[in-house]
């Protein structure tokens, strides 16, 4: 069973330290949620885990499959079995969803074997239909240009379709609920739930309890000041919804003064 282990991770951007010692373990088969106020480093953590070049790791390790992935490029981390669903997916006019996904699959295959000629089109079409049926998506979606003119919900569904097709072992969902109305939120959550299981570990980053009404986490973590300050079960998210973050801030102050 694979696991992602984050050890004392410190990260800066433009010389300013954002993450100040994050420790977390996410195993296959587990769903973890990270919550916290704006500006606490949640998205910084997501981008750092996938190798965004603007973020500088100043201390710590991220271990996945017995190696420190901080030494790997973003595409190498993806091929190793990691996936990031973006908060704001980018549109690629002129490239269909189907062509994008087939190119991604073939890039992975050729990284293993340079002589690989890619997945045959009939085999790819069968795979794509299987995944779209699983996610209850109209087959016409595959012929549209990736995220070009998509609604917020359609962009997020395209991200989930990528996840279904690439079959990562650890998936990071960076504020997947951002900009979604309640109907779109349910559709996206249903897609995530259709993919979860013993072979997939999920790290959900969100501001709101509402997403966790549909994607049920095993563990909830609160990030403040660039580190995880509180962890618990699903009830922790309900406490945050009811009481906000002030009680955690007060708890932190008390512990620092002790």
Image (spheres, rainbow, N blue to C red):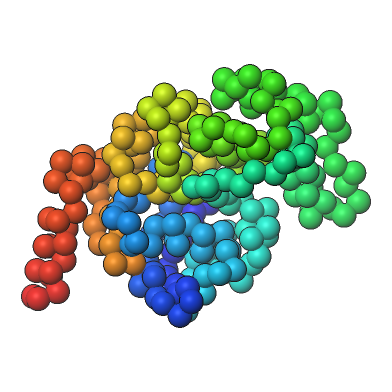
Residue 112 % position (x, y): 79, 54
Query: Is there any visible trace of residue 43 in the rendered image?
Result: yes
Residue 241 vs residue 95: left or right?
A: left
Q: Nearer the viewer, residue 241 or 10?
A: 241
Residue 59 vs residue 82: left or right?
A: left
Query: Is there any visible trace of residue 228 in the rendered image?
Result: no
In the rendered image, which quarter contains the C terminus?
bottom left
Q: Is residue 2 above or below residue 152?
A: below
Residue 84 vs residue 37: left or right?
A: right
Residue at x 29% of width, y 39% of height: 209
Residue 70 % position (x, y): 56, 69
Residue at x 64% of width, y 43% of height: 91
Q: How many marks?
A: 0
Q: Nearer the viewer, residue 175 or 23?
A: 175
Q: Quadrant of residue 132?
A: top right
Q: Is residue 51 above or below residue 142?
A: below
Q: Is residue 158 above or below residue 245?
A: above
Residue at x 52% of width, y 41% of height: 200
Q: Quadrant of residue 235?
A: top left
In this view, the residue farthest toward the front is 149
Q: Nearer the viewer, residue 162 or 166?
A: 162
Residue at x 20% of width, y 46% of height: 240
Residue 74 % position (x, y): 64, 60
């Amino acid at each position: 069973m694979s696991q992602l282990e984050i050890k004392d991770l410190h990260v800066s951007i433009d010389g300013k330290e954002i993450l100040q010692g994050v420790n977390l373990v996410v195993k296959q088969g587990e769903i973890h949620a990270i919550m916290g106020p704006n500006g606490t480093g949640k998205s910084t953590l997501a981008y750092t885990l996938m190798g965004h070049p603007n973020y500088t790791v100043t201390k710590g390790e991220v271990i996945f499959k017995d190696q420190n992935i901080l030494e790997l490029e973003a595409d190498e981390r993806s091929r190793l079995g990691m996936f990031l669903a973006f908060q704001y997916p980018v549109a690629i006019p002129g490239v269909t969803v189907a062509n994008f996904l087939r190119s991604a699959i073939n890039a992975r295959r050729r990284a293993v074997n340079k002589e690989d000629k890619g997945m045959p089109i009939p085999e790819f079409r069968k795979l794509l239909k299987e995944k779209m049926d699983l996610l209850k998506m109209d087959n016409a979606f595959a012929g549209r240009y990736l995220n070009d003119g998509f609604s917020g919900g359609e962009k997020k569904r395209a991200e989930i379709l990528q996840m279904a097709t690439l079959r990562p072992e650890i998936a990071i969902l960076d504020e997947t609920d951002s900009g979604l109305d309640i109907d779109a939120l349910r559709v996206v959550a249903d897609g995530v739930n259709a993919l979860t299981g013993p072979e997939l570990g999920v790290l959900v980053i969100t501001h709101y309890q509402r997403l966790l009404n549909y994607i049920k986490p095993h563990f909830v973590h609160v990030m403040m000041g660039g580190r995880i300050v509180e962890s618990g079960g699903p009830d922790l998210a309900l406490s945050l919804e009811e009481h906000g973050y002030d009680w955690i801030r007060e708890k932190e102050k008390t512990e620092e003064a002790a």
